[in-house]
Image: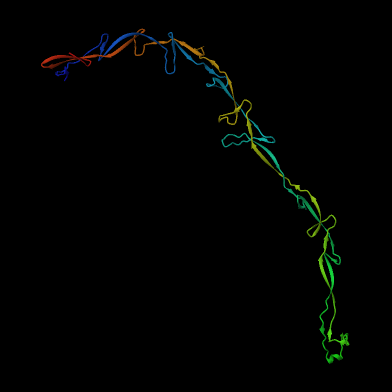
Amino acid sequence: MLFINATLVSAGKAENPILTCPKGYVLIGENCRSKHVKDLVPYCGNDEINNYELVNDMCYDRVAFRKQCENGRFNEEYDMCVETSISAPIVTCPADYDFVSSPKKGHDGKKLLGYCEKAVSLAGPSVCPWGTKPEGKRCASYQKVTPFWNCPAGTKPRGQFCAHSEKYDCSEPIVPIAKKSKKSDKKRRLGEKKDLRVFTVGIDGLMEAPELVAIKRTCIRETMIPAVMQCPQGAAQKQTDCVVISYYETEEQKGSITYESVPASPVCPAEYRFCDTKKNGGMCCKNVETKPYRFCDFGYVKEDGHCVRAFEPVYICPVEKKLRKGNACDQYDWKPAEAMVTMYVEDNKKKYDVVIEQGKKSH
């Protein structure tokens, strides 16, 4: 159903649409096409790699010079040929040390250059000669000699002692004389002396004392004292002996040899530095820079610091243009065709023809 002038109408069945094209266009299917003739355009064959320049209907290819090094490799950063010269470092050792090459490798896997070494003599111990003993900082031997033994006055020498004699009273105590029996009075032993009769002096003269016997004795007491030892001239007393001391210097026994080592000090020659590559680790490197030889490939010429090649372009149709016979291109323009639909509508028993063109409504 359609609404025309806000009045409800009932529409009949639409007839088949009629397709039309603007002037100059030809209906092809449901589209319209117009055909135009265009001239060919020069094309140099540019792509993602080649970027040729078109000047006055000529193509130009500009590339950088080719560079070739007689020695070493070309370095883009420095625009020079760089040749690396490798030399072994000079190893130096402190004074009195000798260099010792080492076939060993360090913890990092690199071969060690070597080390510096010197022999050091160690003194042997100082000892005393045979038959001597240490005496302070020296050595001494001892020879015993006979000493002199001196005794004080009033004593007599007896070896290493002195004898002192002293008299003293050693009488026995007074004891009573036993009485003799009558039988014994008549007999007397051979050599027996008559009884001693002891008298004492009293007021009335001599009086016979009681029968007592007193025997007086004198004894000699001998005391031993150590004699005073005196060493001969040139001898000295050592404990209980007299000795003649002879002094000697200590003797040094045969020593040993040890070795002291210190790391070697590698130094690069003048103008060299230690290589920073793993391949040449521990060696000295020097970069020698030279200018490369610059040239152009065949077909190119040197021009303004580049290699330039000129060539004829090819002529093609512009984009979206089709090549026609001859030196011209057929250009096609396309647009959708216009559709016109006719239908009958009834409003209050009146009929209208309604034409709809491309969605537009008209009476």
Nearer-the-camera pick, 9 or 143: 9
Image-based side of 312 in relation to 100, left or right = left
Q: Which residue corresponds to the image point at 64% horizontal and 37% vertical from the top-left?
A: 262
Displayed quadrant of residue 312 = top left
> Residue 10, position in %: x, y?
14, 19
> Residue 230, position in %: x, y?
83, 59
> Residue 50, position in %: x, y?
44, 16
> Residue 21, position in %: x, y?
25, 11
- In the rendered image, the vertical position of residue 258 relative to residue 285, given as above or below: below
Q: Which residue corresponds to the image point at 84% horizontal and 70% vertical from the top-left?
A: 165
Check the image and name the residue furthest to the left: 349
Image quarter where the N terminus lies is top left
Q: Number of marks in the image? A: 0
Image quarter where the C terminus lies is top left
Image-based side of 13 in relation to 326, left or right = left
Q: Which residue corresponds to the image point at 38% horizontal and 10% vertical from the top-left?
A: 41
Displayed quadrant of residue 331 = top left
